[in-house]
């Protein structure tokens, strides 16, 4: 979006002023609103620009060049309402809120974190109890970006104390809460290390009455609403980091072209060139991650892994890149007379906000394991008849009926090619002619009782892994079947 780039170019001085005045740049926010950019993901029929997550990422990247106060206020505003209403809202909620948001008349905030619940978002303690057509909300939220500035707050509260609801993640509900709702107040505004000028603080809900019609997605669906919103949030949040990366590179290049040491510009020093090369490649890499994830979301694909990967890698790259930019600029880079040091103070929060990078690793591990399930299946291995070494095979397996002798043999043959591994039930079933789970369990238990097999029982007593014991191996096959020596080995050393 060329318009966003030109706007950012023109607004850069005001962004730098914010770093000194520490005042939120309200006039910039109003201009962003007047250009309709708050409606960038909102369909045209609700007064938006319909440019999707990709459009939102482009605007946020450009605003990020100006200052974090404006880019975060803008991005967080969308996290607090747009995605949740678009995906889970009723037609009436869409018609009521989306046109206002699109015009910038309803700046948003997202309220998940609490004093006693951070990474463990399912453990929030703010409660919502239904009384007629109203929910009574009690509790607190902290670290809320746009606290006080926002008109519309997406608040997640605990609507059920039933154990079974908690177990199914059906104990939370999402609400749209308007500024001015009785019982709703700002308790505290934080002094942050970075994000200069951006209001962030604690909110208090004291018997706050929220109309049931402001519930998003229905009672008990809060977790689903939260998770869907977080993918959008992580992508757009990452896009916001691309802007300062570009500005840091601009500052480092411009500075080192003009700074002379040892009779030459410092940009000619190979160490500085290597740092700049890493900065450029870091930026290009991060761009690919962000816009790939944005594209997937626009295609309505599940982008949980991609969004979390973007948030984790972009924030880590951001921190390194800004630190390198300061290094290229030497002492000047660390003064407040250039904006780069402010980006470094912002770097840390990017590794914490929208879920810490440690939580991103948990999400990526679990999500990718599921998403790549088919590609992660272990290939069956066998001894190559000519090479006489273990290799993967796709040849059909000779199937055997379930008997103690056959099961033990299967485990022993697996020992030959995977000497340190247990077999899964699936591995064993591939080699059996009967898919009879019960018979297999009974056979394995009988072998275990005889000391021929060792079983590893996973959760809830299920038998997940099995191996032949040394006694079992000896009983299944003669030693000759296990022996293997490299050709170069002198025969004298074998006994
Ligand atoms: C400037 C700023 C703006 C924010 N804006 C918002 C906002 O607008 N709305 C909102 O709802 N929240 C917001 N947050 C809150 C943010 O999402 C949380 O700070 C974040 O989720 C971490 O929670 P916590 O700070 O309580 O840390 P904790 O959850 O207490 O974590 C402390 C440390 O333990 C680690 N940890 C915790 N659990 C695990 C685990 N299971 N495995 C491995 N490591 C773990 C964490 O990674 C972290 O390093 C904001 C935070 C900041 C600082």
Image (spheres, helix red, strand yellow):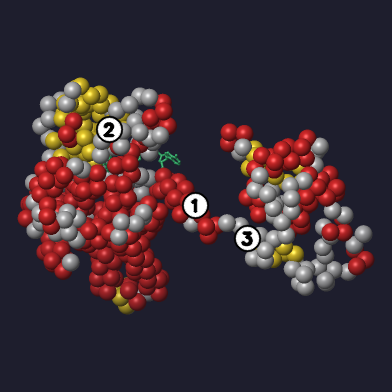
Q: Identify the residue at horizontal 13%, vertical 35% (top origin).
A: 178
Q: Earlier in the sequence, mark 3 or mark 1?
A: 1
List x then y, in percent, for residue 139: 25, 26
Q: Is residue 466 above or below residue 487?
A: above
Mark number, residue 369: 1
Q: Is mark 3 within 8 Å of ligand 1?
A: no
| Neighbours of disc 2 within 10 Å: few (<14), some (14-19), many (20+) | some
- Can residue 266 be seen by looking at this rendering? yes
Cα–Cα span, label 3 and label 1:
16 Å
| Nearer to us in this view, 96 or 368 | 96
| Nearer to us in this view, 142 or 223 | 223
Q: Identify the residue at horizontal 41%, vertical 28% (top origin).
A: 164
Residue at label 3? Answer: 379
Q: Nearer the viewer, mark 3 or mark 1?
A: 3
Mark number, residue 219: 2
Instruction: Classify mark 2: helix, strand or loop.
Output: loop
- Can residue 290 be seen by looking at this rendering? no
């Amino acid at each position: 979006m060329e318009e966003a780039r030109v706007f950012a170019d023109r607004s850069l001085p005001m962004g730098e002023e914010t770093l000194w005045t520490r005042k939120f740049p309200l006039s910039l926010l109003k201009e962003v609103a007047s250009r309709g950019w708050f409606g960038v993901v909102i369909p045209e029929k609700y007064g938006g620009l319909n440019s999707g997550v990709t459009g939102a990422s482009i605007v946020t990247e450009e605003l990020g060049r100006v200052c974090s106060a404006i880019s975060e206020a803008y991005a967080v505003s969308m996290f607090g309402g747009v995605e949740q209403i678009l995906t889970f809202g009723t037609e009436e909620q869409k018609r009521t809120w989306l046109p206002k948001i699109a015009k910038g008349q309803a700046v948003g905030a997202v309220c998940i974190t609490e004093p006693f619940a951070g990474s463990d978002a399912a453990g929030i303690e703010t409660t919502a109890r239904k009384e007629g057509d109203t929910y009574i909300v009690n509790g607190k939220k902290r670290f809320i970006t746009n606290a006080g500035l926002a008109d519309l707050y997406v608040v997640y509260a605990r609507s059920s104390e039933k154990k079974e609801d908690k177990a199914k993640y059906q104990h939370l509900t999402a609400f749209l809460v308007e500024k001015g709702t009785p019982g709703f107040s700002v308790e505290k505004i934080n002094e942050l290390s970075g994000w200069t000028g951006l209001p962030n603080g604690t909110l208090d809900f004291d018997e706050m009455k929220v109309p049931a019609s402001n519930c998003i997605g229905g009672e008990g669906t809060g977790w689903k609403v939260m998770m869907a919103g977080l993918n959008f949030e992580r992508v757009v949040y990452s896009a916001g980091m691309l802007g300062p990366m570009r500005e840091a590179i601009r500052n480092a290049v411009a500075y080192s072209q003009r700074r002379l040491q040892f009779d030459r510009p410092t940009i000619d020093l190979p160490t500085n060139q290597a740092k700049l090369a890493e900065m450029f490649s870091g930026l290009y890499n991060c761009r690919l991650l962000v816009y790939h994830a944005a594209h997937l979301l626009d295609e309505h694909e599940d982008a949980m892994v991609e969004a979390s990967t973007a948030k984790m890698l972009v924030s880590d790259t951001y921190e390194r890149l800004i630190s390198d930019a300061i290094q290229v600029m030497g002492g000047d880079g660390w003064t407040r007379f250039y904006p780069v040091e402010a980006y470094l103070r912002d770097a840390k929060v990017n590794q914490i906000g929208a879920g810490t990078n440690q939580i991103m690793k948990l999400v990526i591990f679990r999500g990718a394991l599921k998403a790549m399930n088919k590609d992660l299946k272990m290939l069956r291995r066998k001894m190559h008849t000519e090479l006489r070494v273990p290799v993967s095979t796709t040849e059909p397996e000779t199937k055997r009926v379930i008997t103690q002798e056959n099961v033990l043999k299967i485990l022993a043959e697996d020992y030959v090619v995977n000497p340190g591994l247990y077999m899964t039930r699936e591995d064993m079933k591939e080699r059996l002619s009967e898919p009879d789970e019960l018979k297999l369990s009974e056979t394995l238990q009988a072998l275990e009782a005889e000391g021929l097999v060792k079983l590893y029982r996973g959760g809830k007593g299920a038998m997940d892994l099995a191996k032949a014991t040394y006694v079992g191996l000896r009983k299944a096959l003669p030693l000759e079947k296990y022996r293997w020596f490299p050709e170069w080995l002198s025969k004298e050393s074998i006994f």
